């Protein structure tokens, strides 16, 4: 709950989890011959506590970051492989996906608030559960603190 996305892999240290997931989505679309135009919407959303989003923990969830990191990863392949396979994939699948893809960080607090409006009983139970998650799985410096869960989590209307 209070960790960021993976920053890379052993073979590609700067190829973060957001970029890998988007590239995998483009690969899945191409492998199944499903152009982005066949979908009403496509998205990559990270659900996280508002405090993590506000602290810019997920700065990698942006088109600029994702495109730059995928470009860098593609550049690591041998030129012959890039020219035969990756250049067409980039042009025909990745760029159209990036043009349509919604990349966003969504605060858990907002999701829970929306659920509370639609389903008050379920939303109340979810809010209580989320408070306990914050209490027991919050940032390391807050774990074990003698504060009630309500004070550890941002307010949910």
Image: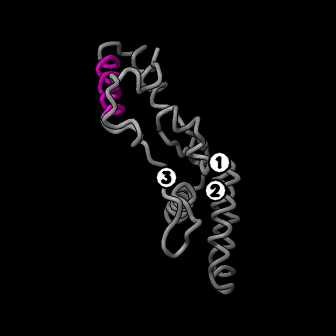
Q: Which circle marks residue 62 in the picture?
A: 1
Residue stretch rendered in magenta on the structure: 122-135
Whether the residues at callouts 1 and 3 have beta carbons within 8 Å, the answer is: no
Q: Residue, x 35% and y 15% (percent of image)?
A: 119
Q: Which circle marks residue 66 in the picture?
A: 2
Whether the residues at callouts 2 and 3 have beta carbons within 8 Å, the answer is: no
Whether the residues at callouts 2 and 1 have beta carbons within 8 Å, the answer is: yes
Q: Is residue 131 magenta?
A: yes
Q: Residues within 10 Å of mark 3 (few under 14, many from 20)?
A: some
Q: Which circle marks residue 96 in the picture?
A: none
Q: Is residue 128 magenta?
A: yes
Q: Quadrant of residue 135?
A: top left
Q: Residue, x 63% and y 53% (percent of image)?
A: 97
Task: Tell whether 139 sits left or right of 30.
Answer: left
Name the element at disc 1: loop
Name the element at disc 2: helix
**Alpha-carbon span between mark 2 and mark 3:** 13 Å
Mark 1 or 3: the one toward you: 3
**Alpha-carbon span between mark 2 and mark 1:** 6 Å
């Amino acid at each position: 709950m209070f960790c960021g996305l993976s920053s890379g892999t052993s073979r590609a240290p700067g190829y973060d989890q957001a970029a890998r997931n988007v590239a995998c989505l483009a690969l899945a679309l191409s492998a199944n011959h499903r152009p982005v135009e066949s979908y009403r919407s496509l998205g990559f959303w990270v659900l996280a506590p508002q405090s993590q989003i506000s602290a810019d923990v997920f700065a990698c969830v942006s088109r600029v970051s994702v495109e730059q990191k995928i470009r860098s990863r593609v550049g690591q392949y041998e030129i012959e492989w890039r020219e035969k396979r990756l250049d067409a994939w980039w042009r025909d699948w990745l760029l159209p996906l990036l043009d349509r893809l919604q990349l966003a960080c969504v605060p858990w607090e907002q999701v829970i608030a929306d659920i509370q409006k639609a389903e008050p009983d379920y939303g109340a139970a979810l809010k209580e559960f989320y408070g306990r998650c914050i209490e027991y799985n919050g940032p390391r410096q807050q774990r074990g603190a003698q504060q009630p869960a309500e004070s550890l989590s941002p307010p949910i209307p």
